[in-house]
Amino acid sequence: MTIHEFGKENKRTVVLIHPSLVRWDYFECVIPLLERKYHVVVPALPGYDPDIKSDFTSIEDIAAELEQWLILNCYGGVDCVYGCSMGGSIVVRMLADDRLNIGSAVIDGGITPYQLPWLFTRFIAVKDFLMINIGKFGGLKTLEKAFAADEYSQEDLKYIADVLRMISEKTIWRTFESCNNYSMPETVVTSCKRIEYWLAENEIKERKWDIRYIRKVFPQTRFLCVKNIGHAGLALLRPKAFARGINRIITQTEANNEISH
């Protein structure tokens, strides 16, 4: 896993974890906005790393590897951890591990473990695998239909098509199988006091199980709905709004910490 760093001279650290089917440069529009104030850490996840030929491992393994890097390089503390979709799953697991001092966390449309019998989870994983493989081999026209609900440009869709050509079928399978079924401790205790779950307006119905799970596991979570955008679209389509959201949660966390002291 390659770790990309920006604004290393800044004291406060923001970690950005990308969703599936994209590379770490999914954040290329928001990095210049954040690196002015923050040390921005962007991991290129296994299977999606253009610099290292690899396959996706699991949510648990990636969370542990990233935690270890942050412990060694950021003295065990970060001001904000953000993860989108698959990246949100990694944030959920990192919060549950509680190995780091995480000031605030954003789970953007994050996927939580399915609370279903094993046979149902296998069926869902197979369905997702086949759907993405159709996109992998179907090319740009297939992606145009799949992403018609959002304002993605031809360049954006070509980018997704390039990523699909890059990643292996093993990575596709492991991504969905792990995101749907990663393990969590029986009792979750996290020291992170400010957690937000962001979701797009048009995915509220799709995320209802995830919302229910997050409310149960992290009852302190605040839920925010972003209008007129689709799943995982905020960083790509509204980078300024994304940066404002990250800055807001860090500022509010710092203000609350000052009051409590």
Image (cartoon, rainbow, N blue to C red):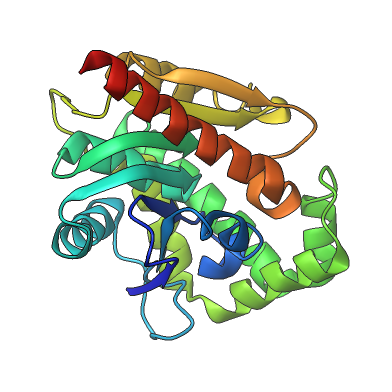
Residue 199 visible, this angle: yes
Locate residue 189: give its quadrant: top left
Q: Residue at x 60, y 30 (%)?
A: 199
- Looking at this view, is 201 or 58 the one in front? 201
> Can you say which quadrant of the picture contains the N terminus?
bottom left
Q: Residue at x 67, y 64 (%)?
A: 134
Locate residue 161: give its quadrant: bottom right
> Can you say which quadrant of the picture contains the C terminus?
top left
- Looking at this view, is 171 or 191 the one in front? 191
Q: Position of residue 98 (x, y in %)?
A: 16, 38
- Looking at this view, is 150 or 255 the one in front? 255
For this view, does 73 lie left or right of residue 58? left
Q: Position of residue 174 (x, y in %)?
A: 38, 60
Locate residue 214: give its quadrant: top left
For this view, does 69 lie left or right of residue 205? left
Q: Residue at x 46, y 18 (%)?
A: 222
